[in-house]
Image (cartoon, grey):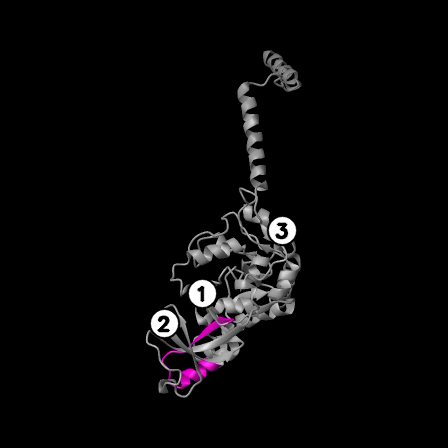
Amino acid sequence: MQKIICSIILLLTFFFFGCQNPVIEKNPSKNNLDSIKLENDSTIAKENEKAIISEIEQIMISAGLINVNSLDSTIKVDLKYSTKNNFIGFVLYDTNFNACYLQKSVAEKLANAQKILCDSMPNYSLIVYDATRPLSVQQMMWDSIKVSNKERPKYVSNPKYGSLHNFGAAVDVSIVDANKKPLDMGTPYDSFDELAYPIMEKENFEKGLLSETQINNRKLLRYCMYKAGFFNIQTEWWHFNDCYRKEARKKYAMILNHKLPKEEQALIAENVVEPTPENKEVNITFQIQILAVKKRYSVDDKMFKGLKVFMYQHNGMYKYTTGQMTNIEEAYVKRTEILELGFDQAFIAAFNNGERIGIKDAIELLN
């Protein structure tokens, strides 16, 4: 009997307390308030972090450029100049900036090139190494490369001539496989070696310096980009232009700076005038240099083997050239002919209105 009474008491106790409403703390402690505040502050901070974008990206957006990933999110982007992994060795853009901004029509072409590639090779993707490059960054490259002034034009385009990159009308691209591994193109991106020159592919293949696979990978890249409306240049397998310079100057504004100004200054330049000395018309010629010495010789000297030779002074030297070609393709053919005549040195020199300029500058001006 006593056991039954105890059991009834336990059941009544459980029923009574189990049916009570949960206690709500009407006056939460300060510690609880602080905890809630910290959680809210943390959430707000994270949201603010997402909202912050780099100065260079703000400039590109204000200039009307668009992020190609807004058109096709599958295009890979690895901006080399936002890292130290570039030929200069330090960050030129911003470590927080890794987006491909281009003129709208150019971005649409690139998205189309990606579609063309994926239609034929579903496991492949384009990868962008550089897109719009403000003129100020081009100047940083020019100033920072550790070579002599006379060697500099061999490696970097002179900022005084500008580039289609400055207009958002050029892009540097390659292809990656399903594992995001770049296809073998024979040289790394931004290589200064002639192995990187599309114009030299046949010769380098015949010499065994480029493999059939490497050339076919380049051809695949060119096929997709050509079909989408781009064209390449003869000295960089990765570089593709949307249009020629004259057209770009009429259609687009040049992006001048990669940093927001502390004082009022231009970020973009409308109606750009070609920044060549004295605004002369571009008149590019290529010649084959066969001798550079401190002593002056007659252009009729027998050492020149009957070639029509020109002499000019450059960097304190007398330099002798032959040939007057208007495109780089003819220049390479001529160089081969000169080497076959037994000359020890024969390399291509570029001129604009008679002034010696770098090969990269000549290619930029021609485009």
Give the number of callouts. 3
Task: Give the image quarter of residue 174.
Answer: bottom right
| Pick the front one: 115 or 277 | 277
Is the residue marked by circle 3 packed among few (<14), some (14-19), or many (20+) residues within 10 Å?
some
Quick check: is 338 in the magenta stretch? yes
Q: What residue type is labelled 3?
A: Ala
> Left of 90 or right of it: where is 33?
right
Which residue lies at the image location 43% right of the left edge and 69% below the top edge? 193
Residue bounds of the magenta highlight? 334-353
Q: Does 231 sit left or right of 141 as displayed?
A: right
Which comes sooner in the sequence, label 2 or label 1?
A: 1
Q: Name the residue under label 1.
A: 153
Give coordinates of residue 288: x percent, y percent.
44, 78
Q: What residue type is labelled 2?
A: Met
Tell me where residue 58 appears, x and y as whole percent.
59, 46
> For the residue labelled by badge 1, is the local secondary structure a helix, a strand or a loop?
helix
- The tag earlier along the polypeptide, 2 or 3, is 3
Q: Do the residues labelled 3 and 1 touch (CB within 8 Å)?
A: no
Residue 23 picture location, percent across and down:
62, 18
Please name the residue that numbered disc 2 is placed on.
Answer: 317
Q: Nearer the viewer, mark 2 or mark 1?
A: 2
Q: Which quadrant does the N terminus fall into?
A: top right
Q: Which residue occupies the foreground of this view, 147 or 240?
A: 147
**SS at circle 2:** strand
Give the class, few, some or many, for how many residues have Cα within 10 Å of label 2's Cα (few <14, many ≥20).
some
Is residue 312 among the parts visible in the rendering? Answer: yes
- On screen, residue 274 above or below 4: below
